[in-house]
Image (cartoon, helix red, strand yellow):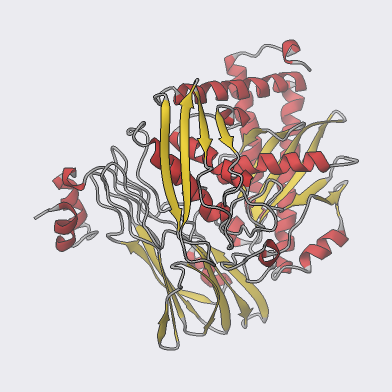
Amino acid sequence: MSQTNMPKIDHVTLAVLQNGLNQVCNEMDLAFQRAAFSPVIAEAMDRSDGIYHRDDGALIAQGELGLPIFVGTMQYSTRTVIAQARDLVPGDIYIVNDPYLGGTHLMDVRMAMPFFHAGEIFCWLSNTGHWRDTGGAVPGGFSATATEVEQEGLRLPPVKLYKGGVVDEEIQAIIMSNIRVASETIGDIKAQAAALWVGERRLTALLDRYGRDLIEAAIVEMRQRSAQQMRACIAHIPDGRYRGVSWVDSDGVVNEPLKIDLTIEKRDGDLYFDLSNSSPPCKGPMNSVIATTRSAIYLAMKHIFPEVPINAGTFDPLHITDPVGTFLYAEYPRPVSGCAAEVSQRIAEAVFVALVAALPDRLFAAPAGTSGNFALGGIDQRHDKPYVMYLFSGGGYGGSARLDGLTNGCSTIGISTMQPIEVLEQRYPVLFKEFALREGSGGAGRQRGGFGVNYTIQLRQGWGRASFVMDHGRTGPLGVLGGADGAVNLVRIERGGETYVPPHFSKDQDIEVAEGDIIRVSTPGGGGYGEARLRDPALIERDLRRGYYSAAQAKELWGHE
């Protein structure tokens, strides 16, 4: 139906349908989470579900419980599936994790299903789940020293895993033969498919109730209004050019920092992003595929303007020049395991730094900016079977114009939280000896940064291989407008009476640990906002009473007697 022939829609009906589409996605999220076997999905919520346009995969709606970094990338992966899909029938589901085809890293596995209504494809339903393992050199897939993508795990082009609602046993067997925890991953595959089927039922009910034409009109109107709202927000930024620079510690192979050099130009009501002056492609796994690079900018702008409803129209005023020839435009066979969890956060940080002077009341100092990816794999002697434990941890948020930064907040790229310690100790042969605030880790400022956390894990029995892909170990999260940087990320492994420190600060892999060995991690604090000398003495006294800082620290940081 052409836009000129679409029915007119009033404000109330539009709001009802917009919330109805979002609710479909929310129910998909919850179904996926509740049915999943892996704690990474079931407890930490490392997944997302959405509805996408039948022609180009443009985002129509995404669940409120989905990861922001998947907002942009799932558009591109769904578009790739649409371009390659053939002979579609109800019940078909494609699976894909190829980073170069609209993805992130190999552990983020996508499924996409054509949604039929009245015998025609109305849209696509798609979701992403973080699998604990997809094979490769190290358990968990976060290879810190990979030099080609094949070392990171099994790479799947779009293939039809379910055909007419029935799983293709041969394709599933190939997948299961290439990962370490196959028996549990089968449960996650079924949960991921079940979420799509829940979406199918709920969307069918919505269409049956309101009719295809009205919902088509609502989708068009939603996109137009989101673009209009984003432009209204951008109007608060004065015309001109803004620059933000951030750094990745290293690529895990060459121990030198990687530069993200961003220029933002505001003109004619839109924003234009240029990353072409960033570092060239790197040897190690910190390269970022273009879908992730774009999505990092999208999520940064959504952080700044959270009131804009999320759909493809949100991104229409944001124009991104492909940074060809840099590590932010990865092409095969560049390794990319750190792109979504780490590099994307440095890109977002560059956006925040660039615009903080233009929007001082909207923006904030840099958050911890690392997912703290830690994977431990080995044989669980209690059950005589392999295990892969993967976790990510929180850190401090940056201070803002009115508030100190949040302590132990989730990473910039999502709403995912660390799995409960009790669950991890029950599922894996580990014991948490410590999980506490990293007091004093927030950068000083008029509003200080939030605190990271300290955690200590001891291997209870057997042996394991530990891998880390983290960041902000060389420099802490940036303070702004005179504020100090937050504390850096720290990793220490105590084994055989000695302490091992990764040469790349917080990136390393295949570190052998045995029963009784201890792993210590301290996550970054957020950057400070504004000059420390302007901090309210009452806030300094409050922090002293709570034990966040010693009297000596308060004197050093704020000159407080």
Evaluate whether residue 197 shows in this view.
no
Q: Return the x and y of residue 231 as percentages of the image width and height.
A: 50, 23
Residue that extends furthest to the right in the rendered view of this protein: 87
**Residue placed at 44% from the left, 44% from the top?**
350
Where residue 106 appears, as percent x and y from the top left, is 67, 58
Q: Which image quadrant: the C terminus?
A: bottom left
**Residue lying at 63% horizontally and 60% vertically, measured from the top left:** 335
Residue 448 location in percent, x, y? 27, 49
Q: In front here: 211 or 66?
A: 66
Q: Quadrant of the N terminus?
A: top right
Left or right? Give the position of 19 relative to 557: right
Q: Nearer the viewer, residue 5 or 314?
A: 314
Relative vertical location of residue 399 with respect to residue 272 in this rendering, above or below: below
Q: Name which residue lies at 67% across and 21% down.
A: 220
Q: Is residue 391 above or below residue 4?
A: below
484 versus 305 height, above or below: below
